[in-house]
Image: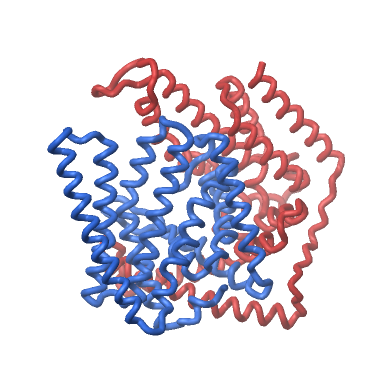
Chain colours: A red, B blue
Amino acid sequence: MTQVLGEVSQSWAVKNDQSRSEAFLKSLDPRVRLVSCVLLAFLISAMHDLGALTLALGVGLGLSLSSRLPLWTTIRKVIVVDSFIVVLMLTLPFTMEGEALFSVWGWDASKEGLYRAAEVGLKANAILFSLMGLVGIMEPSVLGHALYRLKVPAKLVHLFLFTVRYIDVFYKEYKTMRMAMKARGFVPRTNIHTLRSIGYLIGMMLVRSLERSDRIMEAMKCRGFDGRFHILNNMKIETRDRIFSVCAAVVILGLLAVEYF
Amino acid sequence: MHIVDGALSNPVLIGGGVIAAAGVAYSLKKLEPEDLPRVGVLSAVFFVVSLIHVPLGFSSVHLILNGLLGIILGWAAFPALVVALLLQAVFFGFGGLTVLGVNAVNIAFPAVMVFFICRWGITAQQQNLAKLVADALFAIFFVLSIWASVSLYETYQVEGATWRVSVNSISLALFAVVMIYGYILYRRKILSVAGFWGFLGGSLSIFFTAIMVAISLALSGDEFAKAAEFVIVAHFPVMAVEGILTAATIQLITKVKPELINAVR
């Protein structure tokens, strides 16, 4: 399991081994989860009605809860993402023109701007929660396989799988080199020395990665690589996937209905 | 640098998605299966690199290094960045699913541009031409900075400076200042010729990215116009940081393993 990509999927893997009490969402076919998540995300980003968006946020929260995300990791993630959004939300009322509601230091906050800020905040969080609940709990490699089965170009999927495979390797290498620098008294500051040292570190990682990729290629050729990867993961649509698909369709149509009526 | 879900308007999202898909399709067509492990491993390195935080004053910035990515990977920067952004969106929650296309274009397109603008200066066998162009560029930046500061001064004199006019001149002046800074480093022999072109690539790619982020924000609605201007001005320190980092990396690579620059075509 790729450690850098998150404790979420890691803790899931451990739990999965110990007890068989999986959340319903996790037992679903990855393709169904991915497709319904993408559809939901695009629908949410196209909606404008605040009521419908609140409902969508509820759906997202429900998905996150029912997939039993680890609480603290999730909260930390949400806080990091929301700290970006808060900046946008705080400035929007003042930069959008419209009916003035109140003013701070001579800047008028408009009603339209406040409405727009609420819209952006709701949208971003609704999409974030449904993404975390449906796709974020997948193993990265399973996500790659699902993409392959969904007819995403094979080369892109292979690139994805390679990247996922080697992120951890190079993260470890990065940590080792940083440790070595630390042992020699390197403290990052705002100066050219720091930038140059980190630049050399990156250069060294690139050099090593090229050498490693040559070894990988040789190993692959040695095992008869002919430009094709065989994805062994056979995914099957079962009854529970059909049930979930119908539910997802109902939710999506329901959100559309709230938006337009 | 990442735009979050929900801020952009639908036409911008669709346009970004279409352009990103076209870029990925073109570069995948060019990519040989033999090169897949190289590109995959290099994009894993760039993913890890994007987790590094560099201190900058009281805060810190995280690296993008799309200039370096473009110089090394060329067109393959498109799929590499799409993969990295997808991973970040799904597993970190940064960026987002619907803005994936726009973010990919904003970061990968400058990378490819830098590949065409700066790579020849790094790989040039006869360095005289590269040196000559570097000097010419310095002259251009110098004139640019003087012109920008004069126009800034004039707007203050004449009309007390509206925010929009002053932002444009300020960013022009700051752009020239960053570039001149790189040239001074090169003149003082801290950067080699290849290093100077690396600096140019690293900082230009951030500049283009900031402009494209600003454009995609501004296209989405007038309410983001100020945010868009803020994005451009806020990126000048990042430009300098990424420029120097890219320069150092390029210098190391040209000394230790020059074939790395031609690793992927």
* Quadrant location of the C terminus of chain B in the rendered image: bottom right
Q: Residue B206's quadrant in the figure?
A: bottom left
Residue lying at 71% horizontally and 53% vertically, measured from the top left = A147
B162 displayed left or right of A147: left
Residue lying at 30% horizontally and 66% vertically, measured from the top left = A194
A94 displayed left or right of B90: left
Up/down of B94 relative to B51, above or below: above
Total labels: the figure holds: 0
Q: Residue A43's quadrant in the figure?
A: top right
Q: Position of residue B226 (x, y in %)?
A: 35, 35
Q: Nearer the viewer, residue B234 or B151?
A: B151
Q: Position of residue A129 (x, y in %)?
A: 59, 37
Q: Position of residue B100 (x, y in %)?
A: 57, 47
A149 displayed left or right of A121: right
Q: Can residue B186 be seen at all in this image of the molecule?
A: yes
Q: Nearer the viewer, residue A49 or A19?
A: A49
